[in-house]
Amino acid sequence: VGMWHEARKHERKLRGMMVDYKKRAERRREYYEKIKKDPAQFLQVHGRACKVHLDSAVALAAESPVNMMPWQGDTNNMIDRFDVRAHLDFIPMYTPALLSPTSPEQESDERKCNYERYRGLVQNDFAGISEEQCLYQIYIDELYGGLQKPNEDEKKKLAEKKASIGYTYEDSTVEELENALEKRPGDDDDSEDDSNTDEDEVIPDIDVEVDVDELNQEQVADLNKQATTYGMAEGDFVRMLRKDKEEAEAIKNAKALEEEKAMYSGRRSRRQRREFREKRLKGRKISPPSYARRDSPTYDPYKR
């Protein structure tokens, strides 16, 4: 009997450790999901104007016959002996982009590149945000980092925590409750002043994301017109915005599907996996199996 109790005690201890490890892994996964960001947010390009200082001694040493060599035996075309062009046999003639005709594929690629380059500027112009406000927002993001907005799940969790059940004590009277709910006339003015000061202190959100599904025809035309000044054709900007939104929705749905699959993985969840499979196949027309019994054909009676 003592050995059985010891085994049960050890089993309970192991089960508690497994539950603890599982909860710890879930907390770790939630933490990493919360701090995970788009890699594009870490990309920063800084430009700075620099003055070129010419050194005549260095220039003469670089152009000396010791360092220069003729390219392909042509003494009129001297290059540095460390130049990579010394390994080339032929250099094609360069034709400027304005003189060379572009193919439709190259033009389409250039419009896509312009969309990726100037998408933020087009949205800022459409929203009426000045360049100074945009640069100030970039400065704030670089100084303090991007502030993460709480998603819908976190908002629901906070709302559930804040929800409470009202309780009236026995010694409290209705008059006291009514007096507590009444507002003093001076409080309204103070609250209005506080709200005005809060509105003044709020910095507008410069990271504009235009939702194309909420725009009317006039706004769509205005947005496409704003994009034409940045090297895009008429109608390209809204079409590419809608395509990006569809791709984001597809990625979101695929991620939710993978998370649901991972949730129902394991040996002990066959019923959950079957329910998930039935839910996914619900509404889909399934053909009968090949081994199913078929009805014999019928023929109309022969008419003489």
Image: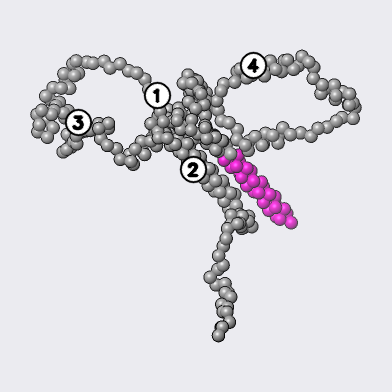
Residue at (45% x, 30% y) in the render: 225
Who comes first in sequence, dot 4 or dot 2?
A: 4
Going by the numbered disc 3, the residue's amino acid type is: Asp
Going by the numbered disc 4, the residue's amino acid type is: Thr
Numbered tag placed on residue 83 in the rendering: 3
- Please rate how many residues cluster around mark 2, counting C-alpha atoms within 10 Å: few if below 14, some from 14 to 19, many from 20: few
Residue range of the region highlighted in magenta in the rendering: 1-29
Predominant secondary structure in magenta?
A: helix
Observer-nearest residue: 138 or 118? 118
Q: Are marks 3 and 4 in contact (CB under 8 Å)?
A: no
Whether the magenta-drawn stretch holds residue 152 is answered as no
Residue 59 % position (x, y): 19, 19
The structure's colour scheme is one colour
The quadrant in which the C terminus is found is bottom right
Instruction: Indicate left or right for 67 with 142 as reference.
Output: left
- Please rate how many residues cluster around mark 4, counting C-alpha atoms within 10 Å: few if below 14, some from 14 to 19, many from 20: few
Q: CA distance from mark 1 to mark 2?
A: 30 Å
